Structure formats: C-alpha cells, structure tokens
Amino acid sequence: MKKPALGRGLSALLEDEKTDPTSKGSEVGKGKTVGSIAEVKIKNIEANPFQPRTHFEEEELNELAQSIKELGIIQPVTLRKLGYDKYQLISGERRFRASQLAGLEEIPAYIRVANDQSMLEMALVENIQRSSLDALEVAISYQRLIDECKLTQEELSKRVGKKRSTITNYLRLLKLPAEVQAGIRERLIAMGHARALVNIEDPKAQIQVFKRIINEQLSVRKVEEISRQLKSQDAAAKGPGKKALPLSLTDKKLKSELTSILQVDVKFQRSDVDKGKIVIPFESEEELSHILDSLKS
C-alpha cells in the first residue's frame, strides 16, 4: 500500500503521478496523457530554442490572434513534456504567439516525449513542410538537419519529401554574399533570382546583378541570361587553356587611368606579350552613354 502524500511536503504532493495531467495513470486529468490532445496553460509553456523561423510578421500575428478570438484554435500545437506541468514547444509557434496576443490562458496541445535531437529534427521538418519560411530560412533549416542531426542529403530528401536537387539548390544559397542573403530574407528577390545569382562565380558581380534586379525589376529569365553572359565572358577571358599573363606596371597604370576616366571597373588582360583585351562593363543604358561620351571626349 502506497504511503499518502501528506507529510512529504507540498512539492511532493504537487509532483505526485496522480496529479500529473500527462501521466498515463492520471485520475485528476483523465484523457490528458502523453500522446493525446490536452488543454495546457500557456504560462507553463516555454518557446522552442530550436525554432528555425526568426522573423514573424506582426500584422499576420494580429490577424491570426483575431481569428483565434472568434473561432478558437483549430489545429493544436505540439509540445514536449519537460517535467510536472512544464512543457516546451515543438511546433506551432505562430499559433502559440497569436494565442498570447488573443489573451488565451490555455491552448490545445498534442503532448510528446522527445530528446533534444529528435525535437530539433521534428521542429525543423515540421516548419519546412508547413510554414511559409523564406528561402534562406529553409536553406538554414536544411543545413542544420545535415549538421546537427547527422543526415545525408539523401536521408534529408526522404525526411522532407523533396528532391535531392531541390535541397542542393537551397543549400547553395548559403554561399551567396551577405547582402544578397539579406535581400532574400526581406523578399526583395525571388528564389528563381537567387538560383540564377548562385551561377555567377564572382561575388562582386553577384552583388551588382542583385542591385540591378531591385532597381530595374529584372525578371528571373533576364537574370539567367545575364548569368550565362557573365559565364561566357569569364570563359573567354580565361582562353582555351591559356593563362593570363601578369600585368606590367605600365598596364596597371593604363588600367587605373581608364577606370578613373570611365568611372567603371575596366578589365585589362594580357594573353600574350603583344596581345590582350580590354573589357568595359556597363550596368545600364545611362552608364553606356556616359562611357561613350567619355571615349569621344
């Protein structure tokens, strides 16, 4: 026969299995077992430290909060049990935050038991599949699954139900310059634009084309065309198996003078002692007109 909880202190009484609403043998909270849906007090839930989403639109949260006030929460959040009446969010952070804004005290939740690694994997996979993450957040989530959950790209492909080539395309975004990555986060450019920029080898050229996309509202097809042109220019500059010769002091001075006069980064290359090429890039019709006027004067 079990000893009564009396005499063991208040904490012992509160932590008794019979008073635990998620315990398999609970009498007080029938139906609120691990693996079922229960009403959990919001104050007893802590945020998910593995949450891949870092930015939440305030207007969208307010709209969701208003919907929750009127209709309630249709889809429960998923929690992991930390201890007596303590939980940690696995998925459903938008619903959790909106419920707080709506002034709810309790929220329906599906309660699971998970260790940190499986929790991380569940949180990342759930967010990739169900949330409108930006392309960079998806890329970061994929990379975290590979690095922290020790998944291969093939295993990751099966986990998230995406082609391996799709995952590779997302991961390549992480190699873009910081300025371009920020543009993806702010949704200044689309995923198609970003994929075309990845194919440009020179980071400076990537940033230049990124700025053109924004200023000139370039289509994805146009950026792909620019990317191909830059690739062809690079291949032509390298020549068929020939290495460019180092520039002499005279050549460097000439390159510097041309750059100063034309106000663009002039490319000067020697393929032989008396052969070479000068490439004068331009970013717009206005810049081309300025170059032509400078050459005429």
Image (spheres, helix red, strand yellow):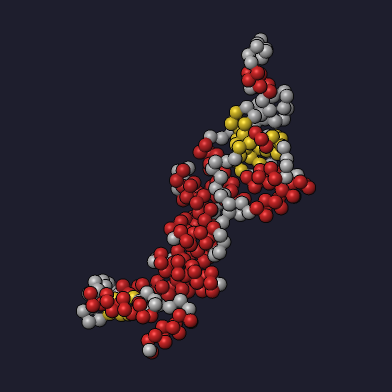
User: Which image quadrant for residue 34?
Assistant: top right
Question: What residue is rendered at 48% in x and 62% in y?
Answer: 180
- In the image, 184 versus 238, the foreground residue is 184
Which residue ends up furthest to the left in the rendered image?
273
> What residue is drawn where x is 56% and y is 56%?
134
When the figure is inspected, residue 225 is found, relative to residue 176, above or below; the finding is: below
Q: Residue at x 72, y 45 (%)?
A: 102
Q: Say which quarter of the image contains residue 83.
A: top right
The quarter of the image holding the N terminus is top right
Does residue 112 appear anywhere in the picture?
Answer: no
Residue 211: x and y in percent read: 49, 69
- Regarding residue 206, the answer to whether it shows in the image is yes
In this image, 56 relative to 178: left or right? right
Q: Is 180 on the left or on the right of 76, as rendered? A: left
Q: Position of residue 260 (x, y in %)?
A: 35, 77
41 sits to left or right of 149: right
Above or below 17: residue 155: below
At x 23% / y 74%, what residue is drawn? 249
- State the residue in front, 264 or 222: 264
In the picture shown, does residue 215 fall above or below 172?
Answer: below
Q: Position of residue 262 (x, y in %)?
A: 38, 80
Q: Quadrant of the C terminus?
A: bottom left
Question: Measured from the top left, where is residue 119 in percent x and y?
Answer: 55, 39
Residue extending furthest toward the bottom: 296
